[in-house]
Amino acid sequence: MAERTQKQKPAPSRTEESVEAAPPVTESGDKLKAELDDLLDEIDEVLETNAEDFVKSYVQKGGQ
Amino acid sequence: MAIPKVCGIETEYGILVRGADGNPVTASSLLINAYLAERQRKIGWDFHDEHPGTDARGFSVDDLLAPEVETHLVNAVLTNGARYYVDHAHPEISTPECLTAREALLFDRAAEEIVRASMRAATAMLPDGAEILCHKNNSDGKGNSYGCHENYLVAREVPFGRIVHQITPHFVTRQIAVGAGKVGCELPGVTANDVPFQLSQRADFFEEEVGLETTLKRPIVNTRDEPHCDPNKYRRLHVIVGDANMSETATLLKVGATAIVLAMIEDDAVGDDLALANPVAAIRQVSHDPSLRRTVLLRNGQRATALEIQWQLLERAQKYERTHGLSAVGDEVGHEVLALWHDVLTGLERDPSSVAHQVDWVAKRRVVEGFAARHGAAPDDARLKALDLQYHDLRADRCLALKVGLDTLVDPADVEVATTTPPSTTRAYFRGRCLAKWPDDVVAANWDSMVFDVGRDPLRRVPMMEPLRGTAESVQRLIDESNTPAELLAKLGA
């Protein structure tokens, strides 16, 4: 839970939304890459150590 | 005028025992019993078929023999009005009846936390080193699927054919916004090299346009006609085509947008021009195309992308808000859903990676592709499949969905309350409050009735055929002021 960022924004009216609200891709590109790198570091730590066995053992009965 | 879109979500969770023997049925039973032993008494589910019978408030009280429980599997009712049970070798939670998509989101999240608590309680009962794992997903990656179903109250008078024709384009295309994402493909003969990643967990498993099945030859529109309320007035549209979502945005949008489209269908405000020439082929094609660029053939001979069809539906929904209002889905929630729908479609159109904080498949694909690039993993590398599974792993320390930066839309404190407290806006309030107040006197409960033991024969059944009666507004005071179920039943007009 703690890792999720609380974000409760009021519903904007349809007229308020605007395309230019997004930051230019080039400016945020490096930041996004750094964030992804951090995330992948964390995933490397928590991913099942024997992924192949885990995937093999993950068999479910079909349901609805 | 469209009727209130009372709704709910039923989720079958994946289950796995590690470090000990255990088949999924006994593991599911252990999981649920461990939770009940820790939290509350077990109240059995009542399978007795109900007959309508109501007074002005929607309740009447009949005499009845003890219901016969027809299953040996665990089947319990929770004080939040939900049902927690074993179904097809999976633990399943059906949320209580909710009045809005926001409530459905809250109780879906509560269900997730109930399963998390159950995993801890059950694992504590196993030998050292053994554990029970649950996943909020819909496929094991080996061709076995299990559902996350939605339910919506629909007026009986609306022709079912109109519902089928007009909701199908939404069901085929909404996955671009609310698909949970999947590594690989489970269609026979299709490899991970052909389809390395797709939008939906479920799309591979749909083989019919419309039908009654839920476990084989699954249809895009399911025809199960079991309203669990007054069948002369209502249908319960049982939607089996969706994915279980980890993203709160996705759950809100999935239920909210679908409720709006159904309200529009009731008011005949959708039209037939979006009908698809081949919905089954289209649902797979859309799922298999993360570029969102491929077009599907419409029945009128034109072609459109899934995004274009979603834009069409959204534009019609916006117009519907202006012409009819959104009272059927809750004005405020409906407006929020339209804004969210617009935001997500805008992001998907501009650059899907811009909605990685909202859309499950985008969030999942980002880590799968990032991991593959970092480690040089080929599309069929087991580690990518493991990432996919672990995205849905409900262990808080392992769950990748909790790490990828998804927005949260509900307060965790509200989620905690919702694990034990029912919504105040539907008959689930009556069910949950009575269970919490008189656990020893409720013999059984189901969606549309409750059976009380009032201390003398026979048992008393209270039918609840109106989903919007038994709300806090109508019965809170009666329950608060009654010391016993007998007093309550007397006040209800027995």
Image (tube, coloured by chain):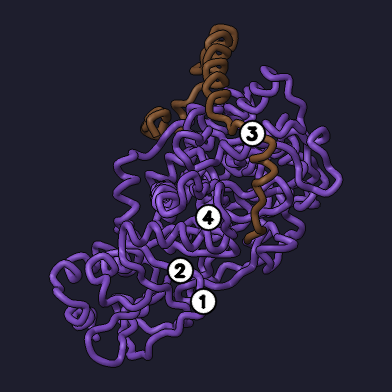
The answer for which chain carries disc 1 is B
Of residue B141 and residue A33, the one placed in the foreground of this image is B141
Using a 10 Å C-alpha cutoff, classify the residue at mark 2 as few (fewer than 14 neighbours), some (14 to 19) or many (20 or more).
Answer: many
Q: Is residue B377 left or right of residue B420?
A: right
Q: Which residue is at 39% across, 47% downward?
A: B106
Pointer 2 residue: B75
- Whether residue B7 is visible here, answered yes or no, is no
Q: Which residue is mark 1?
A: B71
Q: Which chain is purple?
A: B
In this rendering, the answer to whether B41 lies above or below B107 is below
Give the CA separation, mark 1 to mark 3: 38 Å
Q: Quadrant of residue B479?
A: bottom left
What amino acid is found at the position of numbered circle 1 in the picture?
Thr
User: What residue would you read off at disc 4?
Assistant: B11
Dot 1 and dot 2 residues touching (CB under 8 Å): yes
At horizontal 54% and vertical 12% (from top left) the residue drawn is: A34
Quadrant in the picture for residue B313: top right
Seen from this angle, which residue lies furthest right? B189
CA neighbours of label 3 inside 10 A, class few (<14), some (14 to 19), many (20+): few
Instruction: Name the subunit of mark 3.
Output: A
Q: Amino acid at mark 3?
A: Asn
- Tell me what hue chain A is rendered in: brown
Q: Earlier in the sequence, mark 2 or mark 4?
A: 4
Q: Are marks 2 and 4 on the same chain?
A: yes
Question: Label for residue A50?
Answer: 3
